[in-house]
Image: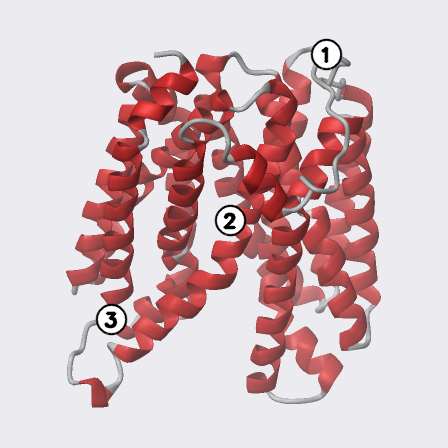
Amino acid sequence: MNNKLPITFILITVVIDAMGVGLIMPVMPDLIQEIEGEGLGAAAVWGGILATIFAAMQFLFGPTIGSLSDRFGRRPVLLISLFVMVLDYLLMAIAHTMTLLIIGRIIGGITAATQATAAAYMADVSKPEEKAANFGLIGAAFGVGFVLGPLLGGLLGEYGTRAPFYAAAVLAGANLIFGYFVLPETVTDKIRRPFDIRRANPLGAFKHLSALPGLTRLIVLLFIYAVAFTVYPAVWSYYGAERFDWSPRMIGVSLAIFGIGIAIVQGVLIRPIIARLGERKTVVFGLSVDVLAFVSLGFVTNGWLALALTPLTALGSVAGPALQGIMSRAADDNQQGELQGLVASINALATIVAPLIVTQTFWYFTAPETGIYMPGAPFLLSAGLVVVCILIFGSARENLQKSLGG
C-alpha cells in the first residue's frame, strides 16, 4: 500500500474537522431564527451558547479520546468518530428544536477530538526530527479547512439552511470510506497503554504529563499562546469593521488570506525553517514574529497596510508546530494520544476563555466613555501574552535539554 495514503487520510480528516465548523457558520443565524422564531439578537445569544458547548466538550473529552486511542489504536477511534460525525451532521440537518441542536453540538464537540487522534497518528509515523514539520502539515490542513469551510457554507446556504449539514455529512462519510481502506494501525503491543480513567480527563492528563522534565511549563506556555492567538477569530471581524470600516465581504476576504498564509507557512516553509534553525530557535523566532505582528496591528490605521501584514502574522505560526514537536519528543510513545488529547483540551479551553477577555478589551477601548480610543488594544494584549511565552520558554530550556538528551 502507498505509504502516502494514510497521511493523506489524516490531513483530509483535519481539513474536514476545520471545515465542519466554518461550513455551518454562515447559516447558523438563519437556522436558529427559523427554529426559535425570534430575532437576530436572540439567535446570536443561542449561537454563543452552542459555540461554548462545542468547545467545552472538546476540553472535557480531548484526553479521553486520546487515551482511548493509546489503548485501542488510532484506526478504530478515528473511524468510529467519523461515523458518529456523519450521524451528528444528519441530526442537525433535520433538527427542528434547540434541544436537538444542543445535542448535536455536544456530540460534535466530542467527535471533533479526531484532530487530537490525527496528531497522535502523525507522531506515530514520524521520526523524532520530523515531528515538528509534520505537525506543520496538520496546521496547514487546518488552514485550508478554515478557508474552504465558510466559502462553501456560504454557497450552499443559498440552497437552504440545511444544505451545509448534508454536505458536511457527505464529506465525513466519504472520508470514512477512504480511511477504512487505506489506514493501517500504528499502535502496537509494544506501545499500547492500558486505559486509566484517572488520566483520561484534562486534570489527570496534566498531572501525569507534567511529571516529564520541562513539560509543565510548555503546557502553560501553550495555553497562554492559544489565548493570545485566539484574538484573530474572536475580534478580527469587529476590529476590521471599527478600524477600517470593512464590509462583511472584505472581512471574509481578509480571513481567507490569513488562512491561506497559515497553510503556506505550516505546509511549505516550516521544513526549511526548522532545518536551518532547529525546533527551539524556531519557537523563539515564531513567538518574536508574533510580538511584532501583534504590536503592528495594535497601532495600524490603514486597512491595506493591515492586509500587507498578513504574511508576517502567518509567519509567526511556525511556533505552534515546533512547540508541539518538542512536546511530542518529550513524551513516551505510549503517551502520544494522551498528550495530543491534552493539547486539544488546552486549545478548547483557550477558545472558551479568550473571547471573553479580548472582546471585553475591544469594547472598553472603543467605548466613548473610556476616553482612550484604541481598537487594536486586544492585539497589544496578545503581544504582552506572547512576551510572557518567550520568558517561559527560556526558563524551560534546561529541563528540555535533560528530557531530550542534549
Which residue type carries mark 1? Answer: Lys
Task: Label 1, secondary structure: give it.
Answer: loop
User: Disc 2 or disc 3, which is closer to the eye?
Assistant: 2
The answer to whether 16 appears left or right of 215 in the picture is right
> Which residue lies at the image location 60% right of the left edge and 58% below the top edge?
55
Q: Nearer the viewer, residue 10 or 76?
A: 76
Residue 266 picture location, percent across and down: 41, 31
Establish if 389 lies above or below 125: below
Query: The N terminus is located in which quarter?
Result: top right
Which residue type carries mark 3? Answer: Pro
What is the C-alpha distance between the residues marked 2 and 3?
Answer: 25 Å
User: Disc 2 or disc 1, which is closer to the eye?
Assistant: 1
Q: Is residue 353 visible?
A: yes
Residue 400 picture location, percent across and down: 37, 24
Query: Is tag 1's residue or tag 3's residue first in the polypeptide sequence?
Result: 1
> Which residue lies at the image location 77% right of the left edge and 41% below the top edge?
82
Q: Which mark is residue 190?
A: 1
The answer to whether 205 appears left or right of 108 in the picture is left
Q: Which mark is residue 347?
A: 2
What is the C-alpha distance between the residues marked 2 and 1?
Answer: 30 Å
What is the C-alpha distance between the residues marked 1 and 3?
Answer: 54 Å
Question: In this figure, which residue is indicated by the disc labeled 3?
Answer: 375
Tag 3: Cα neighbours inside 10 Å, few (<14), some, or many (≥20)? many
Q: Nearer the viewer, residue 223 or 116?
A: 223
Q: Quadrant of residue 42?
A: bottom right
Query: Is tag 2's residue or tag 1's residue first in the polypeptide sequence?
Result: 1
